Image: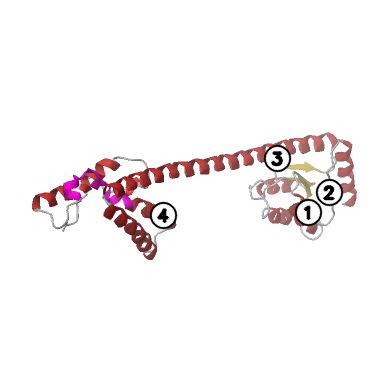
Amino acid sequence: MPANVLLLERMLRGAGYASITSTTDSGDVFELHRVNFYDLILLDLKMPGMDGFEVMERLKELETTSYLPVLVITAEPDHKLRALQAGAKDFITKPFDLAEVLARVENMLYVRMLNKQLHHYNDVLESRVRERTAELQESSLEAIFTMTRAAEHKDVDTGAHVQRISHYCRALASMLGMDEEFIERICFASPMHDIGKIGIPDNVLLKPGSFTPEEAEVMKGHTSMGAKILGNSNSRHLQMGPPQDATACPVN
């Protein structure tokens, strides 16, 4: 076995490969790959201690991309299919043929490069999606804050009320065991519940004391106005606003 390792190393160095590590101890493979994260591992299936199949199982713990860069070496035909099923990407048959070894190594390194590029592209794509999602959420929240400020400008009491409602909704949703996404959404969406008051005439909205029956009916209309203002928005926050058939609570 040491002779096979030495022969392979000479073949690869003779072909121009310089960054090569070799070992005859199967127990060293996992730690060496953990430290160096090799692009290719030539692995003999028949070794003392752990065999090649056991080594591949351990290596899978390190390969978070699910790509196992292993080229197995075997003289037993029935091991080839088993090795591929275990995660190996290709195999070399003993005794070695120089041209076959170099061709398979070159192909494996090319596939490994493509796999790394794909993994990098996916990481970049996920990052861009996260950035775009954050931008859209920021725009949605800015629209909510703008409308809330408009309501506060018209009625100071409404402004203080919606802030309290926002805190109450967060606390209640948390107590009910809702997930973090729902808690965040209802915290920012709840200030929208009185947005329809923007459309209520000042002589009714700002009137001190009790409303007449007619004024009470006008005031109740703020829920329908709120639904019209929010419309059929695609924003997850605005979708939590009052529905089109919203009804008002009794008004004092």
Marked residue nearer the N-terminal end (2 or 4):
2
Q: Is residue 197 magenta?
A: yes
**Residue of label 1:** 32
CA separation in Å, label 2 and label 4: 52 Å
Write the residue at 81% across / 55% down.
Answer: 47
Count of marks overlaid on the render: 4
Q: Which residues are magenta?
A: 191-205
Residue at the image position 66 percent from the left and 48 percent from the top: 85
Residue count near mark 1 (Cα–Cα under 10 Å), binned few <14, some 14–19, many ≥20: some
Q: Amino acid at mark 3?
A: Arg
Nearest to N terminus: mark 4 or mark 3: 3
As rendered, which of 34 and 167 lies closer to the eye? 167
Of tags 4 and 1, which is closer to the observer? 4
Residue where numbered disc 2 is placed: 21
Dot 4 amino acid type: Glu
Marks 2/1 in contact by CB < 8 Å: the verdict is yes
